[in-house]
Amino acid sequence: MDLIRLKNVSKRYKNGVTAIYDLNLSIKKGSFAFVIGGSGSGKSTFIKMLYREEKPTTGSIIVGGVNVAKLRNKKVYKLRRKLGIVFQDYRLLPKLNVYENVAFAMEVIGAKKDETRRKVLKALELVGLKNKIHNYPDQLSGGEQQRVAIARAIVNEPKLLLCDEPTGNLDPDRSIEIVKVLEEINKTCGTTVIMATHDKEIVNKMKKQVIVLKDGRLVKQQERGTYDEAF
Amino acid sequence: MKLFRMLGRSVRDAFKSVFRNFSLSLASISCITITLIIVAISILASFNVENFTKEIEKDMTIVVFVDNKVEEDQVKTIEKKIKKMANVESYVFKGKETVKEEMQKESDIFNTIMQDWDSESNPLKDTFQVKVKDIEKISKTANKIKKIEGVAVVRYGEGMVDQMVTAFKSIEKVAYGIVIALVVVTVFLIINTIKLTIFSRKREISIMRLVGASNFTIKTPFIVEGMILGLIGAIVPVCLVLFGYLAFYNHFDGYLFSELIQLIKPEPFIYLVSLMVVGIGMLVGMIGSASAVRKYLKV
């Protein structure tokens, strides 16, 4: 079953730059997909449209049965509750410790305290940070910070996890660790993971589905694909 | 339950924010305080003016003296005409015999003089005592009555009372003008305070949006913050109302200048005014923060 389906999607920014041209693709539930391509290929725009940070200029984007392209600003929060998002720059709150950073995602949607506690600890265990719940972000390494961000993204048990270059700031070893964590989440929770990256090594090592974008166009979509030099 | 949890969070965040940006909060709070002090004084004054003008109004009557030569039929016509006037609340007719009797009762001298008067030789006039609805139009109504055929003289408390009412009314208008200007300034200051809070919490807000906080959740802390600024700003003005008015009342024994101007009793008046002051403070804070949220928080 398709979790995501894009039909004739194009995106033209207000400054006249077109980031995506006539994109058609679908991604199955429970899959792990890399979105790859160089700078300016439209990876980030693609991810942003999935969580409705950007609206497509034309076409429809169905995420979990909802046409995100037509979602009104007021209703966006309902979509966001069903998905987790991870960024290159972690986006943690520096004044909150690890536990509070993850719990923040539960608190702002009005979850109960005991439920929050249970889920936060579970998420932190999954990313292997249960022993550092009282640390503050500046006391953690980059890889650990990113794992906190992943814990925050999955604490709400989303069906879809979007990652926009999550390993962009990390060395190769830490990058592999992060991707392994994502793979673990994909396997144990059945969460669909979509990860934008330009890290060849990771893509070739993991042998997952690849979606290749170049200059805003879909070049190929392949199961167990690799990062070809040609792109 | 969920709503209460969210509200609790909002209040907590709002308090934190007030103290985090304390210097700017203090500016807003002082401005609210000054505004509310003037608002409080205006309210106290206008209620008192209202009160004693009403007291005076109760006693204010137009006395219409009917010409002695007029026949009884025409007296009836005059009565009808007075009755028809829009501003006339009620009237009492007193024939000259009744007036004579009343005057006789009042003093012995009158009594001796008037004893010999019979209905023919009675030089007194038939009168109507007219009460009006709107005291400000009393002179107009009096003039209108005077023009009725057969009316000899019209008397009412012209002069002092008239001038006093107009003076108080114009003071009231000036006070309202000042209050409105101050409220506008305060609202702008609050908008700025909240704007700073919003900017200092941009990161937090963007994360809230990412993890699916509703607009209500994002906005409420800022609105509550504005209301808290209003509430804190109301503390001094409320004390002023509670203790200041009481002291003022006791100092003057409940009367201002003369027994004519009676002050309103402090209880429960001061509590009511305090409530109004707090309400206005919170409302102004809310208006300021709501417009800041609308302007700077694109959600």
Image: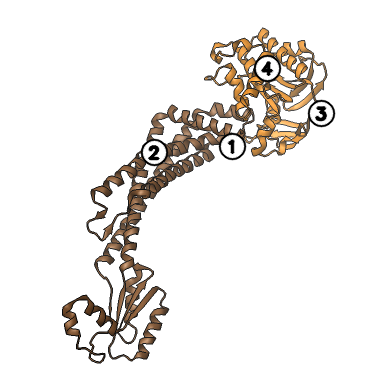
Real-space CA distance between mark 4 and mark 1, rounded to the nearest whole angstrom:
28 Å
- Compared with B217, A184 (above or below) is above
Viewer-nearest of discs 4 and 1:
4
> In this structure image, what is the colour of chain A?
orange
The circle on residue B233 is 2
Chain of the residue that carries numbered disc 1 in the rendered image: B
Q: CA distance from mark 2 to mark 3?
A: 57 Å
Q: Amino acid at mark 1?
A: Phe
Give the mark toward the camera: 4 or 3. 4
Q: Earlier in the sequence, mark 4 or mark 3?
A: 3
Tell me the SS state at disc 1.
helix
Q: Label 4's element?
A: helix
Residue at x 52%, y 28% (from the top left corner) = B201
Query: Same subunit under labels 4 and 3?
Result: yes
Q: Where does the image place residue B253, in percent across and percent down from the top left? A: 24, 51
Specify the subunit that label 3 lies on: A
Q: Which residue is mark 4?
A: A122
Between the residue at mark 1 and the residue at mark 3, the CA separation in whole angstroms equals 32 Å
Classify residue A224 as left or right of residue B12. Answer: right
Question: In the displayed structure, does residue B261 sit left or right of residue A224?
Answer: left
- The chain letter corresponding to brown is B
Residue A230 visible within the image: no
Give the distance between the C-alpha atoms of the residues marked 4 and 3, in whole angstroms. Answer: 28 Å
Of residues B248 and A4, the one nearer the viewer is B248
The residue that appears at 27% across and 53% down in the rendered structure is: B254
Residue, disc 1: B216
Tell me the kind of residue under disc 3.
Asp
> What's the mark number on residue A2?
3
Dot 3, how many residues are within 10 Å of its Cα: few (below 14), some (14-19), or many (20+)?
A: some
What's the chain of the residue with tag 2? B
* Residue A112, percent from left and from top: 63, 27
Pick the front one: A102 or B279: B279
